[in-house]
Image (cartoon, rainbow, N blue to C red):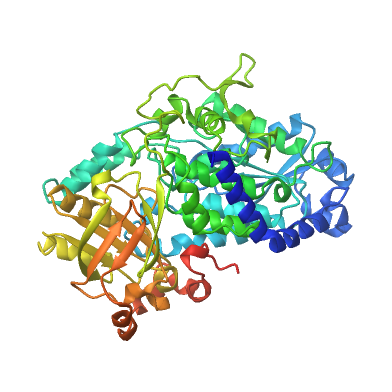
Amino acid sequence: MSALKAIEAITDRIRERSRPLREDYLGRVEAATGNRANRAVLSCGNLAHGFAVCAPNEKVALGGDVVPNLGVITSYNDMLSAHQPFEFFPQLIKQAAREAGGIAQVAGGVPAMCDGVTQGQPGMELSLFSRDVIAMATAVGLSHNMFDAAVYLGVCDKIVPGLVIGALTFGHLPAVFIPAGPMTSGLPNDEKARVRQLYAEGKVGRAELLEAESKSYHGPGTCTFYGTANSNQMLMEIMGLHTPGASFVNPGTPLRDALTKEATKRALAITHLGNAYTPVGRMIDERSFVNGVVGLHATGGSTNHTMHIIAMAQAAGIRLTWQDISDLSDIVPLLARVYPNGLADVNHFHAAGGMGFLIRELLSGGYLHDDVQTVWGEGLAAYAVEAKLGADGTVVREPAPAISGDDKVLATSAKPFQATGGLKVLKGNIGLAIAKTSAVKPERRRVEAPAIVFHSQEEMNAAFKAGELEKDFVAVLRFQGPKANGMPELHKLTTVLGVLQDRGYKVALVTDGRMSGASGKVPSAIHVTPEALDGGVIGKIRDGDLIRLDGEEGTLEVFLSAEEIATRTCVTADLTANGYGMGRELFGAFRAMVGQAEAGASVFA
């Protein structure tokens, strides 16, 4: 079967499975769609409150129900490097809206926390839940019903998925996502990782480590490695929610500003007050989500998206599963090598041809649905381009380069880096799990070793420092799932396990927690479901049990008979400390309500 036919078959399967929910969702979108400005239903008192601070001419225009009003949902704060550039976007957007004969208002803000700041800290236990808070905050901003379209300013890990869930909940509104772009390249990511390992081994001090980290994370924009933040940007473009070529242009540049203005004008052009009405709820369908998953596999994208993209699809009435993701991984080749899957950063990826080259190659190989609707119009082929700054200061587009600017960073579909995608679903008697294989050398993808069980990152790090881990083993870290403690990223373990692997030991990680889009060179089975607190088999594993993790075959087994597993009881853990401090006491309801990782780890049923 050809790649295109196989992908069409998976898409049809998703479509049939989703039909009742999707039809119900589209019915709600249709019911919310009118032929007048949305604010026409507001009373005079409602409207007066809604435009109280507008200029007199804007009040007249908004009161007349014929001028489109654009809502801006922003995740701006000036602590988070990726979102600091958004400080200046509202003024650019308002200016562009006026030039296009419309009006723009900041509808609301959403929280934007940084996983980099909270790694290994109590605050990280709020990170995954922040996605659903962002979706709810988006709904609050748009609930005023003053708007005919919305633009969404967000970049990083949980922010974009939360904004997408919010946007799809208001599916009758056109939605354009406007990125801020990556920071310029600093200290190479592999050098930063080397210094981290030296610090973990006690060979350099905190001053040297801080210097390396500061040279890597050094200015406005996203971190330059290919983690969840930059996977988000790839996803928004390949799903048609960005304008073509917008994802990886650095902030603070004339092209970045021109793209922002252009996106604003495009959002106003596709409201129901014009002739190209493109409500996001109808625009994004099963084909769009399949294209998104294909993009994740082709680039070795973030493991976090095995949860986020499922939660996003649910918001549009679409049932996407890990099995769908797994089956697509067997079809889609890996075309990008960006750290941690290679030495390049996202700026190098962009310079080598970037999204335009990637989309062109995937389309030509039959791996993407071209017959989709996007914010730019019909067909994904319009995204096989490179955005540049024209002489008049506006955006011009040229066809993506025919040849990769660096074939060690960006490959063709005819000569991929590997024949299958960068993410793998593992199955076995421990449950289901996710592995990011693209960053792991083929000879490291199979590990069979005794288990050493831990209940916290700190416990494992202490064992490392005490010299107790100088051997082959599989670290089993449990009670890290969404119900137990909010499923924090366990990124601190990457360095420890990397050191042990470099010393020649066969090591792996099995956990019901997360490792992040920066999951590195050590084979890891993450997002294990059911989690320990849900009675999962991971809660029955004991020190010394033999475990096999096979990233090639896609299996995850503990060498125990079914009878032995059935007779063992799940251990318990004292999770009292996870319930308070750094705001965790406010999220008890989230921990109680959240679904399993394979269902998106969402509080929205």
Residue 302 % position (x, y): 43, 48
Q: Along the line of sight, which residue is nearer the eye, 322 or 483?
A: 322
Picture residue at 32% right of the left edge, 36% below the top: 342
Across and down, in percent, residue 265 comes to 71, 33
Relative depth, front residue between 420 and 91:
420
* Left or right, residue 577 beside residue 86: left
- The quarter of the displayed image where residue 270 is located: top right
Residue furthest front in the image = 1
Q: How far from the left and from the top, in percent, is residue 299?
A: 44, 39
Quick check: 493 left or right of 595? left
What is the quadrant of the C terminus in the image?
bottom right
**Residue 249: percent from left, percent from top:** 50, 30
Give the answer, above or below, for where 14 lies relative to 218: below
Q: Is residue 468 left or right of residue 191?
A: left
Residue 558, placed above or below residue 575: above
Q: Residue at x 75, y 59 (%)?
A: 23
